[in-house]
Image: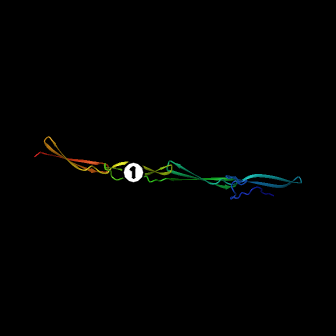
Amino acid sequence: IAWFAGQDCAPDAEPGSPGCPVQVCFKRITTVRRYQKNCKCRKSVKTEKQRCRCPKSSKKVSCHSDNVIKVLRTTYTLRGNSCLKDEQTKATKVVCYEKEKPDRSPCGEDGYRQVKLVSYQARDCKCTRRVRVLRERCSCPKDYRARECINNNVVSTFVTYTLTSKECIRRSKITKEKPS
């Protein structure tokens, strides 16, 4: 004859209830065996602990190299009197918009404007805004003509400016005239 005593271990047992610790659950099994020896009835009692529930599943999230999120999932499956541990790792790369997007201010009286270059960079597995501020040439001085007398000659200088992508290119045309 065998019979069991102790708490049944139902999967929905309340954590913290007697015989069912929060992380690991064991149940106590008592086996009573009756037998006859030397014409007398005898009884043997054997008590053992048997696992009846495994630890809860867990998830650990970590950041690597500023741009890789790793998720480690650990699950346990009850097999016989032990828990089989299964770990799965998933890595996801954090992708940020890295191309710099220019934000230009209006052209100032000095011929320059402010340019904010906004981009995003992975830091601690989050996209962090990065701003660089530059000065950019946006207009050139006005063209002009200058006249002066050098060695009894009238020298005319005509100066023009051409705006390229980064600077003003100055061109001068000099002509000499004899005084009349």
Q: Position of residue 31 (x, y in %)?
A: 79, 55
Residue at 37% over, 51% down: 115
Label 1 element class = strand
Q: Position of residue 56 (x, y in %)?
A: 64, 54
Residue 8 in the image: above or below residue 178: below
The N terminus is located in which quarter? bottom right
98, 132: nearer the viewer: 132
In this rendering, would 127 be left or right of 32? left
Instruction: Tell me the amino acid under the disc marked 1.
Output: Lys
Q: Position of residue 150 (x, y in %)?
A: 16, 41
Residue at 81% over, 52% down: 45
Residue 114 in the image: above or below residue 10: above
- In the picture of the structure, the residue carrying the numbered disc 1 is 116
* Most distant residue in the left direction: 180
Evaluate whether residue 103 shows in this view.
yes
In this rendering, would 22 be left or right of 4? left
Evaluate whether residue 51 shows in this view.
no
Dot 1, how many residues are within 10 Å of its Cα: few (below 14), some (14-19), or many (20+)? some
In this rendering, would 165 be left or right of 100? left
176, 8: nearer the viewer: 176
Q: Position of residue 93 (x, y in %)?
A: 50, 53
